[in-house]
Image (tube, rainbow, N blue to C red):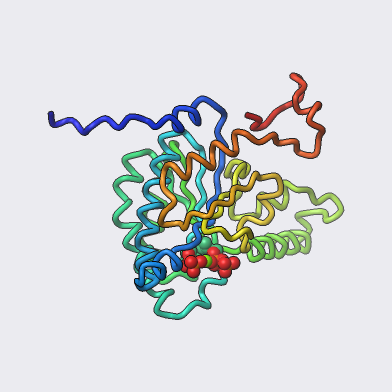
Amino acid sequence: MDRPPTVLPTALEVQVRARPLPRHVGIIMDGNGRWAELRGQPRLEGHREGSVSVREVTRAARRLGVQALTLYAFSSQNWARPPEEVAGLMDLLREYLESERAEILDNGIRLNAIGEVDKLPRYVREPLERLRADSAHNTGMVLTLALSYGGREELLRAARDLAQAAARGELDPAHLDADDLESRLWTAGLPPVDLIVRTSGEQRISNFLLWQLAYAELCFTDALWPDFRTEEFLRCLSQFQGRERRFGLTSAQVNRDDTPQRAKA
Ligand code: IPE
Ligand code: IPE
Ligand code: MG
């Protein structure tokens, strides 16, 4: 009687659970403003409703066993939005970090952030760093928030780092390899990105994970982010599971038993 009601998984969830999942999913959470405008509400209401989707999708990813979920919450370019929208987003971020803290810790999730985090106001940076430190030993799923993030900015920083290491004589430019660069990206240590989702009908990348998406599958959906909930997420996972990833090989090659298959359904 005092037990919470058991929620039965939907048919789609049962189907998705039966096949290999992407290890790392990145989501471009777009369409909050349009969601609000369609309802005659201020854009910030869309961002607020979007944080409900963040909670639902994070729960679903954790429950299914996705290893890493990276959410594009604020781009380097988003700073140029009207100051009241930027301030509203920062307030919401702080609220999110406080309201989700217990759930993140209780569910073994490790909270991580990528981007120019030092540009965030102190009232966001503090709860972020606290949760990052307090969840550092969790092993369940890595939830990465891309905050003041840009793929070009990330690559530039890595290039600068490499050039400085070469100038110090610690690195031979002639033997520079992909690992040297990857280890200097903010995403170092995370599993390879298998799937990128973008909501709101836009079919562009908008400076998200530019290096990392080289062989990621892409899922574009018309749903606006505040409408993107568990079933929508499952639909993207199911699409992913129906794709054949060839990594430059032929279909016959990837279907041979002795060829390593990374995420073929
Ligand atoms: C995504 O929604 C959230 C952020 C970029 C911070 P938008 O605010 O871009 O919503 P639209 O694209 O204007 O509808
Ligand atoms: C991408 O959305 C950034 C985030 C979702 C945080 P934008 O709304 O900023 O992208 P554009 O302007 O449509 O390319
Ligand atoms: Mg947008």
Task: Give how far across and how far down residue 191 sits, in percent.
Answer: 59, 41
70 vs 110, nearest the viewer: 70
13 vs 143, nearest the viewer: 13
| Residue at screen point 38% across, 42% down | 59
Where the N terminus falls, by quadrant? Answer: top left
Q: Residue 243 vs residue 229: left or right?
A: right
Total number of numbered labels? 0
Where the C terminus falls, by quadrant? Answer: top right
Task: Give how far across and how far down residue 7 sits, in percent.
Answer: 30, 32
**Residue occupying the far left of the picture:** 1
| Up/down of 220 relative to 151, above or below | above
| Up/down of 219 relative to 152, above or below | above
206 vs 8, nearest the viewer: 8
Task: Give how far across and how far down residue 158 sits, in percent.
Answer: 68, 60
| Residue at screen point 61% across, 48% down | 188
| Residue at screen point 49% across, 77% down | 81
Q: Residue 247 vs residue 142: left or right?
A: right
